[in-house]
Image (tube, rainbow, N blue to C red):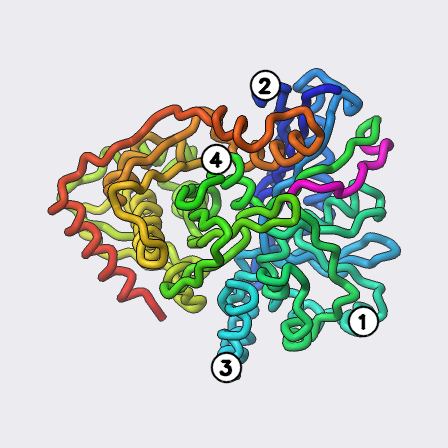
Amino acid sequence: MSGYILAIDQGTTSSRAIVFDGDMKIAGVGQKEFTQHYPQSGWVEHDPEEIWKSVVTTIRQALKKAGIEASDVAAIGITNQRETVVVWDRETGKPIHNAIVWQDRRTASFCEKLKRQGLEKTFTAKTGLLLDPYFSGTKLSWMLSNVKGSRARAARGELCFGTIDTFLIWRLTGGKSFVTDATNASRTLMFNIATQEWDAELLKTLRVPVEMLPEVKDCAADFGITEARLFGAEIPILGVAGDQQAATIGQACFEPGMLKSTYGTGCFALLNTGEDMVRSRNRLLTTIAYRLDGKPTYALEGSIFIAGAAVQWLRDGIKVIKKAEHSGELAAEADPTQDVYLVPAFTGLGAPHWDAEARGAIYGMTRNTGPAEFARAALEAVCYQTRDLLDAMRKDWKSSQADTVLRVDGGMVASDWTMQRLADILDAPVDRPTILETTALGAAWLAGQRAGVWPKQKAFAKAWARDTTFKPKMDEKTRNAKLKGWRDAVRRTLS
């Protein structure tokens, strides 16, 4: 059997398909951006049909660039933007509303209402999550309340709910497979991560009929077979994981205590805690890192809503750079005597603050502040937010500062300036791997080892290769002063 594996990486701003060969090297890539819809302040939507078309297009592009046919592909692995909600008609497959994106904040008041009723402890105990608009459950409840007749239709079994993975699998298999994996299920506010089942009490609270929920499988499992008409041959779908969990796998963070952070639109740090469901005392999330052979491995997660999106804002919003990759060069030119802080709460603040009402702010500007200082502030904001997460993890997970090494991936890590500043602010080494496509690689590995054409876990971990280690160079006095300024800026920004 061929060793080619196709990874579908369906992200927040673009869809990508990557063909990996038998040596786990990239053979072909397809990528297509799609439209972001902002119907109201704080609302973010995607058109599921546009996402579907972009996925089909990029798969065909990747196969063509790799110079192979669909029949040469042993399996497909899927990774996806998590928490984004799609509801569609079980008969026609047509969505009843635009997808509500993980960044969307429309359910903030509903979350506050549930908190006032004293329900957050119940949700956290069962799901490991907090009551925040970020997660899928309240978005789904909103859709059922606001699309006429949808709740009754859902109760009759006429509607399907899914995160993006479920919607894509449904479409790829022609409606034959209605499934998700444990990592995506664990982000919905409806899945009990201890019992590994949809939770009847939480569903009742959110008024979600169980009839509309997919079957939950391991991350490496038989998820269905694509229709031959789509790509010219049937291909089994054998791996699925939400994007941050897929990156954890792609970084080979299989041992308890291993830490990875992905810098894409947002930033997400996951700390493997093994069989232990560590209950955070510092408002981090307890989540499923992956589930293999029916056995869940848990993680502590810190979620930052704005990372690369701050660079997009520099480029598209205030137009101080023409290309995202220029941000590091510009930041290096900033005046070192100016302490400018950007708190990028454009859609609220994530961990460890969880303030849905906070909004972005800039502090420390003078008449001399210009594009270079803005660029540095945007990149440093990512570093400071990561430090906040790491501090919280150290309090929850007994680990000395000396043994922390962070494995990084995502678009932002190509910037040497940003990664050096990250190491400086964390006061810890930062490892950048040779393969930066770790999210897609993680999904591909799940499928490849399931298909029997890629190595098992230990051999895969040994194959992980480091490109560069960035070691801290900043003196302690400078670091502490910068962190003090950052914490003051956050305090002033919180709602």
In the rendered image, which residue does mark 2 sit on? 23
Give the residues drawn in magenta, as a range: 219-230
Mark 3 vs mark 2, CA separation in Å: 52 Å
State which quadrant residue 414 falls in. top left
Residue type pointed to by label 2? Asp
Residue 329 appears in the picture as rendered: no
**Figure check: 263 above or below 493:** above
Residue 472: x %, y % from top left: 22, 36
Q: Secondary structure beneath disc 2?
A: loop
Residue at 63% over, 56% down: 185
Q: Secondary structure beneath disc 4?
A: loop
Residue type pointed to by label 3? Gly
In the rendered image, which residue does mark 3 sit on? 118
Mark 1 vs mark 3, CA separation in Å: 27 Å
Q: Secondary structure beneath disc 1?
A: helix
Instruction: Looking at this view, name the residue that lies furthest to the left.
Output: 477
**Figure check: 467 above or below 230:** above
Residue 446: x %, y % from top left: 63, 36
Residue at 71% over, 71% down: 208
Q: Nearer the viewer, residue 168 or 218?
A: 218
Q: Nearer the viewer, residue 89 or 312?
A: 89
Mark 1 and mark 3 in contact? Answer it, CB < 8 Å. no
Mark 4 vs mark 3, CA separation in Å: 38 Å
Residue 213: x %, y % from top left: 74, 61
